């Protein structure tokens, strides 16, 4: 077999493969026999028709195609291996010349992995903004815990506060027309955490039980309903109930209810959680900053074909997530605009590709390879996240090669990141305001 390699535009490689005539002839004869096994030819049992009869019945071109389907994959695989081609797409046949008694000529093309030129990726000192536990985080965490165990009680002797829950009837109108879906009875609205139209909840503060009144609001310019974007609206309101959340007393009795002997133990656990979160945030920020520094110093020309494929994949994932949320692509496009969405997706695709190429390059240079224990750790982590035993997860992934490949890529990514953290220094600096 003779192979000629030609680099075409961007990262496309062309392989001109010549297969000797005797091999092509043998493949043709074998194809005749295979075809004769499954075609019905009058007067002959399957597999017994002479070659000439099979050729007349199905045509020589069909037989040649069968022969090529048998010969080409092995020939292309050998060409890729012998020429040490690092491909990122499956080779595909673009042309062939097959004349009986002559050498078979096959033309195949594929995309090569873009060449990555790494910058400095070892012995760096990378400055990282140190994570800071926010002021009041402890009190907020403690209050959140108390809120989880609070009781809602009805209030009858005062107007609404901005921390109350107002149980209301409301009925909305815009430009003299009733708003579709703009009404409800006995709707409990948390005035402190409302996701209603801006200004809606604020106008319910200071109102009395059973009071009826109107409020004026304006729909946001980015509202999903084209008819209501930026439009003024009037809502008729009635306060049916005023409720507030009463927090339990912070004492040892409460602490015991949530799994601690004393309030001091409870407070120590909250502080320990905040400290661990602080440490984890610093770890993640450090890894990300070191990796970003390494990637930014690398040079790689990524062809548009790669970006388009990755963007298409990301778009499909995005559409599936929208469906899971009860939304669809067209609805989101109306709000955000397709050009803006696709711009973001393509930027994400470009970053992902470059990240992956840099990781693979470092792994190759430093001979970072996956071991069985690396995959076992990934199976264990993923199994814990989904409540599955590792062996059950392995069975499921066995029928999903793409998921298994993705998991392997995650594992090698982790090893490269660990390598970068071990071979570079991090200098924490105060967070800029």
Image: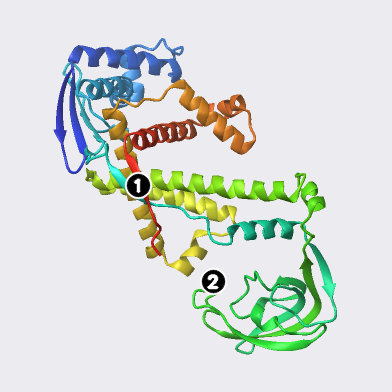
The quadrant of the image that shows the N terminus is top left
Residue 155 in percent (x, y) is at 83, 75
> Which image quadrant is residue 62 in?
top left
Q: Quadrant of residue 136?
A: bottom right
Residue at the location (79% across, 72% down)? Answer: 243
Horizontal side of 128 relative to 397 (left or right) equals left
Give whichever of 21, 378 is nearer the camera.
Answer: 378
Can residue 308 be spotted in the picture?
no
Residue 224 is labelled as: 2
**2 or 1: tag closer to the N-terminus:** 2
Question: Left or right of 109: which side holds 134?
Answer: right
Dividing the picture into quadrants, the one containing residue 421 is top left
> Which-is-in-front pick, marks 2 and 1?
1
Q: Is residue 290 above or below residue 39?
A: below
Category of crowding for the residue at label 2, using alpha-carbon neighbours closer than 10 angstroms: few (below 14), some (14–19), many (at least 20)? some
In the image, what residue occupies the spot 52% across and 76% down? 226
Q: Nearer the viewer, residue 388 or 126?
A: 126
Mark 1, residue position:
427
From the top left corner, tell me how far across and down residue 314 is, in percent: 43, 49
Q: Quadrant of the C terminus?
A: bottom left
Q: Position of residue 76 (x, y in %)?
A: 26, 24
């Amino acid at each position: 077999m003779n192979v000629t390699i030609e680099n075409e535009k961007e990262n496309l490689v062309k392989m001109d493969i010549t297969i000797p005539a005797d091999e092509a002839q043998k493949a043709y004869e074998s194809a005749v026999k295979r075809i004769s096994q499954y075609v019905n030819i009058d007067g002959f049992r399957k597999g017994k028709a002479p070659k000439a009869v099979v050729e007349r019945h199905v045509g020589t071109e069909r037989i040649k195609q069968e022969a090529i389907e048998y010969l080409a994959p092995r020939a292309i695989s050998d060409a890729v291996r012998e020429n040490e081609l690092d491909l990122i797409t499956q080779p595909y046949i673009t042309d062939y010349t097959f004349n009986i008694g002559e050498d078979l000529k096959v033309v195949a093309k594929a995309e090569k992995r873009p060449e990555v030129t790494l910058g400095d990726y070892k012995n760096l000192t990378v400055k990282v903004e140190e994570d800071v536990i926010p002021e009041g985080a402890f009190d907020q965490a403690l209050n959140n815990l108390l809120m989880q165990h609070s009781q809602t009680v009805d209030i009858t002797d005062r107007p609404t506060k901005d921390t109350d829950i107002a149980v209301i009837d409301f009925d909305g109108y815009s430009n003299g027309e009733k708003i579709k879906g703009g009404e409800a009875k006995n709707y409990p609205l948390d005035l402190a955490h409302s996701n209603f139209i801006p200004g809606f909840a604020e106008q319910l503060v200071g109102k009395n039980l059973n009071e009826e009144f109107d409020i004026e609001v304006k729909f946001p310019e980015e509202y999903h309903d084209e008819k209501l974007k930026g439009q003024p609206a009037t809502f008729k309101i009635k306060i049916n109930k005023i409720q507030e959340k009463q927090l339990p007393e912070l004492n040892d009795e409460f602490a015991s209810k949530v799994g601690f002997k004393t309030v001091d133990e409870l407070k120590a656990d909250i502080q320990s959680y905040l400290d661990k979160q602080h440490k984890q945030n610093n770890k993640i920020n450090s890894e990300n900053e070191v990796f970003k520094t390494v990637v930014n110093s690398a040079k790689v020309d990524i062809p548009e074909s790669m970006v388009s494929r990755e963007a298409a994949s990301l778009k499909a994932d995005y559409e599936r997530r929208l469906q899971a949320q009860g939304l669809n692509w067209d609805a989101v496009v109306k709000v955000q605009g397709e050009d803006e969405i696709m711009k973001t997706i393509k930027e994400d695709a470009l970053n992902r590709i470059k990240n992956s190429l840099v990781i693979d390059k470092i792994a190759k240079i430093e001979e970072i390879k996956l071991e069985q224990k690396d995959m076992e750790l990934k199976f264990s982590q993923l199994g814990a996240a989904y409540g599955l035993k590792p062996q059950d997860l392995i069975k499921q992934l066995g029928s999903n090669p793409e998921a298994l490949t993705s998991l392997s890529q995650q594992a090698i990514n982790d090893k490269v990141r660990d390598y970068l953290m071990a071979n570079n220094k991090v200098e924490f600096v105060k967070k800029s305001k």
